Amino acid sequence: MVDGVLNWASLAGVLLLFGGLPLAVSAGFQLVLQLMGRARLADGLVTLALLQGLLLLLRMAMPAMGLVLILQGWRLDSALQLAVALLAIAAFLEAVAGTLRDLDGWQQRRRR
């Protein structure tokens, strides 16, 4: 049985799905550009690449979580739907804030 009701969890799922796709793509490009920009391998580069890869996996998880919330959010009770929606919105805003910080740092480095 599938209920076609749009609820808080489904709205948060839509936000995570469509908001997380550009973040996942940008994290992938950031990892590739970080690795292509260095001529030699160093310990710091390997650590940075591992952290960037972890960031890529986390940002790829946001659209997957959104899809789960869209498809299964109708099964949650009202209080849990609101809690999940607030957590999803907080995760999305944190990801956007990190992306904006990265963009600002990139622009400042480019000006030098």
Image: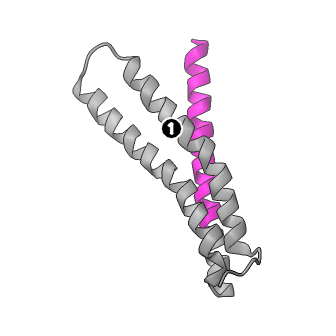
Residue 68 location, x and y as percent?
57, 67
Residue 54 location, x and y as percent?
38, 46
**Magenta stretch mostly in which secondary structure?**
helix
Residue 24 location, x and y as percent?
54, 43
- The picture quadrant where one finds residue 105 is top right
Task: Tell me which residue sits at (26%, 15%) in the image.
Answer: 40
- Residue 9, above or below 42: below
Task: Tell me which residue sits at (53%, 58%) in the image.
Answer: 64
Disc 1 crowd rating (10 Å Cα; few below 14, some 14-19, many 20+) is many
SS label for mark 1: helix
Residue 101 colored magenta?
yes
Q: Is residue 19 left or right of residue 109?
A: right
Q: Is residue 36 left or right of residue 99?
A: left
- The picture quadrant where one finds residue 66 is bottom right
Pick the front one: 12 or 112: 12
Q: Which residues are magenta?
A: 87-112
Q: Is residue 57 left or right of residue 26?
A: left
- Residue 53, above or below 44: below
Instruction: Tell me the amino acid under the disc marked 1.
Output: Ala
Q: Which residue is mark 1?
A: 27
Residue 105 colored magenta?
yes
How many numbered marks does the figure carry? 1
Q: Quadrant of the C terminus?
A: top right
Task: Tell me which residue sits at (61%, 14%) in the image.
Answer: 111
Q: Quadrant of the N terminus?
A: bottom right
- Residue 34, above or below 74: above
Task: Tell me which residue sits at (59%, 40%) in the image.
Answer: 99
Q: Residue furthest front?
A: 1
